[in-house]
Amino acid sequence: MGLQQKVMEQMKAAMKAKDSVALESLRAIKSALLMAQTSGTDKEITEEDEIQLVQKLVKQRKDSAAIFTEQGRADLAEPELAQIAVIEQFLPEQLTEEEIEKVVVQTIDATGASGMKDMGKVMGIVSKELAGQADGKTISAIVKQKLA
């Protein structure tokens, strides 16, 4: 079952449960999917594209929540965090930092990377390998730590 069907089923359940946070989150996913489908390109949206799209929505909400928290606006940060929980259901299971670290170390060994000059090469390989399973910010932090 595709992402769009899953979202529609969840939307029906959220409407019946009168869950406004879930409904708003699901509508955001549906909207992003429709925008991607009608973006003018004839190519079909792949599962990889769907994962990237959902990751982007989660990242936007995390960034917003961080800004609201920084400004002492917990009242605005809480709905963003609640939406993250709903949207993350559509992502593959996220890896732990230890699991990400293993992949980074293996990639560094395989590529022979040494130093920050090779960060881009390592990041590209690891990001592609862990697509949808890890946050880019976390991967970047681990790669920097290992190459420093």
Image (tube, rainbow, N blue to C red):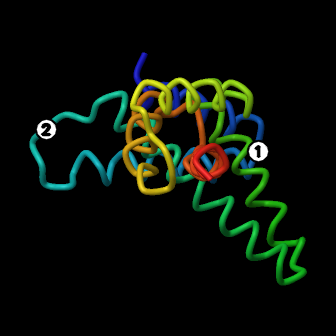
Mark number for residue 19?
1
Determine which quarter of the picture holds residue 135: top right
Q: Going by the image, does 95 lie left or right of 76?
A: left
x then y, percent, for residue 140: 57, 50
Lower position in the chain sequence, tag 2 or tag 1: 1
The residue most toward the top is 1
Q: Amino acid at mark 2?
A: Lys
x then y, percent, for residue 65: 75, 66
Are the residues tagged 2 and 1 within 8 Å (C-beta)? no
x then y, percent, for residue 83: 71, 51
Mark number for residue 108?
none
Vertical placement of 76 versus 126: above or below? Answer: below
Give the total of numbered labels.
2
In percent of the image, x 29 and y 49: which residue is there?
36
x then y, percent, for residue 12: 60, 33
Q: Which residue is mark 2?
A: 43
Q: Amino acid at mark 1?
A: Asp
Q: Going by the image, does 137 lie left or right of 18?
A: left
| Residue 55 or residue 148, whichever sits in front | 148
Which quadrant, please, contains the N terminus?
top left
Q: Label 2's element?
A: loop
Q: Residues within 10 Å of mark 2 (few under 14, many from 20)?
A: few
Vertical placement of 33 versus 134: above or below? Answer: below
Marks 2 and 1, Cα distance to the nearest angstrom? 34 Å
